[in-house]
């Protein structure tokens, strides 16, 4: 320290101060001479402004011109769903084929995200809608074509009728559906212990009587003895009915 004081003169101190001002003064001078916003984009050399020179939040959406950020400038995985505003990406902003099946996570497309009429028959693959994918009660009469619905039967019921039981040579019985129902099937049988009686007719009533009011509502059955019969017997008709 004593050695330094021997060489510390007024002239040496002035020289050091002058050197310090000379070295630092240029930076001050440049800063003082440049007015605000005088450095524009055209004054910056290519690659001068790097990511590390930008403070957090410096580049906002308002500072990015339309079309400046293209797909080629976005790295893989740079934009995920947490960085998108609700409604930020609309269908009109997506090019054809951009959203593929592989880009949709399981369960991402739910029924409330589909527009009315969005899923048509032409967009369903073969066997894509199986019985296991249809909710109980989902297919109602209102959803069926009228031509198809007319072929379906509802409220199926059964009725029967039996003739008198005696030794007469021939008998007939007619089973009639409840009001509002029509025949969808029927049959006949012989009742009693006999081997000499045969069924001679078993058919809807319209087969023997002309009916113009639509499908028949009765079933007729007839039987007759093919030889003398000593035991009492009867013929029974039964009918299966339903509404259409």
Image (tube, rainbow, N blue to C red):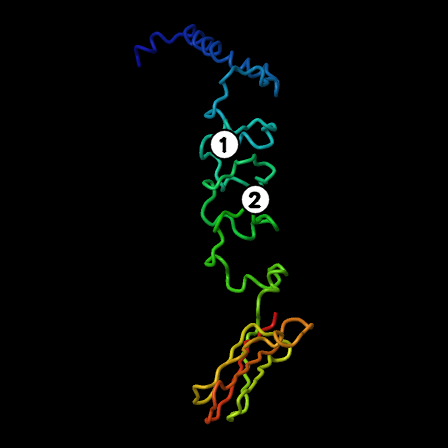
- Residue ranking furthest to the front: 227
- How far is the residue under mark 2 from the one under mark 1? 23 Å
Residue 39 picture quarter: top right
Name the residue that disc number 1 marks: 56
Front residue of this view, candidates 50 and 199: 199
Q: Give the total of numbered labels.
A: 2
Q: Earlier in the sequence, mark 2 or mark 1?
A: 1
Which residue shows up at 62% across the image and 62% down it?
A: 142
Task: Provide residue 107's location: percent of width, then percent of height.
Answer: 47, 50
Which residue shows up at 47% across the image and 25% down it?
A: 51
| SS at circle 2 | loop
In the image, which disc is placed on residue 66? none
In the image, which disc is placed on residue 86? 2
How many residues crowd mark 1 within 10 Å: few (<14), some (14–19), many (20+)?
few
- Residue ranking furthest to the right: 212
Quadrant occupied by the C terminus:
bottom right
């Amino acid at each position: 320290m004593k050695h330094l004081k021997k060489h510390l003169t007024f002239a040496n101190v002035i020289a050091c101060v002058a050197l310090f001002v000379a070295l630092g003064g240029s930076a001050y001078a440049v800063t003082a001479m440049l007015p605000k916003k005088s450095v524009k984009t055209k004054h910056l050399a290519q690659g001068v402004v790097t990511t590390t020179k930008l403070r957090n939040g410096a580049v906002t959406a308002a500072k990015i011109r339309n079309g400046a950020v293209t797909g080629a400038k976005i790295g893989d995985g740079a934009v995920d769903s947490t960085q998108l505003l609700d409604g930020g990406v609309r269908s009109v902003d997506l090019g054809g084929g951009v959203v593929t099946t592989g880009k949709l996570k399981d369960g991402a497309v739910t029924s409330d995200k589909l527009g009315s009429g969005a899923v048509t028959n032409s967009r369903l693959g073969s066997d894509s809608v199986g019985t296991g994918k249809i909710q109980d009660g989902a297919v109602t009469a209102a959803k069926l074509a009228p031509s198809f619905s007319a072929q379906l039967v509802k409220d199926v019921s059964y009725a029967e009728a039996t003739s008198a039981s005696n030794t007469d040579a021939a008998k007939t019985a007619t089973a009639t559906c409840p009001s509002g129902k029509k025949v969808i099937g029927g049959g006949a049988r012989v009742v009693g212990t006999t081997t000499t009686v045969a069924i001679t007719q078993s058919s809807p009533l319209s087969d023997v009587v002309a009916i113009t009011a639509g499908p028949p509502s009765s079933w007729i059955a007839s039987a007759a003895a093919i030889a003398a019969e000593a035991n009492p017997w009867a013929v029974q008709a039964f009918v299966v009915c339903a509404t259409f």
